[in-house]
Image (spheres, rainbow, N blue to C red):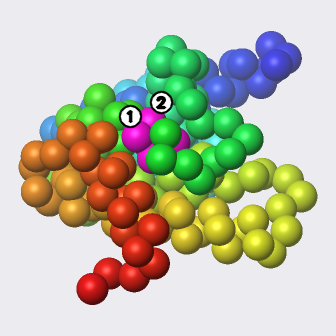
Amino acid sequence: MGRGTRTTEFLKECMADALIDLMRRKPFEKISAGEIAEAAGVGRATWFRNFSGKNEAITYKLVRLWYRWFEENSASAGAERYTIDNAIDFLSFCREYRGLIEDIYAANLRSTIYEAFYYIMMPQYGANAEECYTSRFFSYGLFGIVDEWVRRGFCETPDELARLFEVMMRRGSIQ
């Protein structure tokens, strides 16, 4: 990764962090690009050069956190994306970042969580139709489980939820 890329990634993360900090203090819809840029110590043009909107910044932050968490935890996600171990990894990540996820829910930004899951699960280059549909299927399924888990107050463990997901997948349908 070149120096320019590292700088851009750093600035993007600073802006996303500034947005998250601001949304903990005021309604999301009332936060302006200028406020985010000022809080991040950058100009408005930098914000618009890097993000098309606030939702994109939240999704970006979730993806960056995932990759960092993945590296720190030697997570199992790899070439075989759609395994029970990968589901446990995603759920463990969500539990660790529970506060942020609850903040995202409080701001009615659930779609940013789904977009982050999909980005992480979707191969970025050369995907065929089957891979694309499979990625959507699993990312929606995991998001559905996380969505209900958040609404239920994170009562179950990641292992319990992953096993439930596995049972549903084996059954092939919900009765």
Q: How many numbered discs sit on the rendered protein?
A: 2
On screen, 161 above or below 3?
Answer: below
Is the residue under label 1 in contact with that under label 2 (CB below 8 Å)? yes
- Please state the extent of the stretch shown in magenta in the rendering: 86-90
Q: Which residue is under mark 1?
A: 93
Where residue 131 sits in the image (x, y, percent)? 75, 65
Tell me which numbered mark, 2 or 1, is placed earlier along the sequence. Answer: 2
Instruction: State the predominant SS element of the stretch in magenta.
Output: helix
* Left or right, 129 with reference to 56: right
- Residue 172, image quadrant: bottom left
Where residue 138 sits in the image (x, y, percent)? 53, 63
Point 55% across, 70% down: residue: 137
Q: How crowded is mark 1: few (under 14 residues within 10 Å), some or many (20 or more)?
A: some
Indicate the amino acid at tag 1. Answer: Phe
Indicate the amino acid at tag 2. Answer: Leu
Q: Is mark 2 on a helix, strand or loop?
A: helix
Point 45% across, 68% down: residue: 170
Where residue 91 sits in the image (x, y, percent)? 36, 42
**143 vs 32, nearest the viewer:** 143
- Dot in front, 2 or 1: 1
Q: Which residue is under mark 2?
A: 65
Question: Is the C terminus in the top left, top right, bottom left or bottom right quadrant?
Answer: bottom left
Q: How crowded is mark 2: few (under 14 residues within 10 Å), some or many (20 or more)?
A: some
Q: What element carries label 1?
A: helix
* Left or right, 53 with reference to 121: left
Q: Can the viewer see residue 151 in this picture? A: yes
Point 48% across, 30% down: residue: 65
**86 vs 119, nearest the viewer:** 86
**Residue 72 inside the magenta-drawn segment:** no
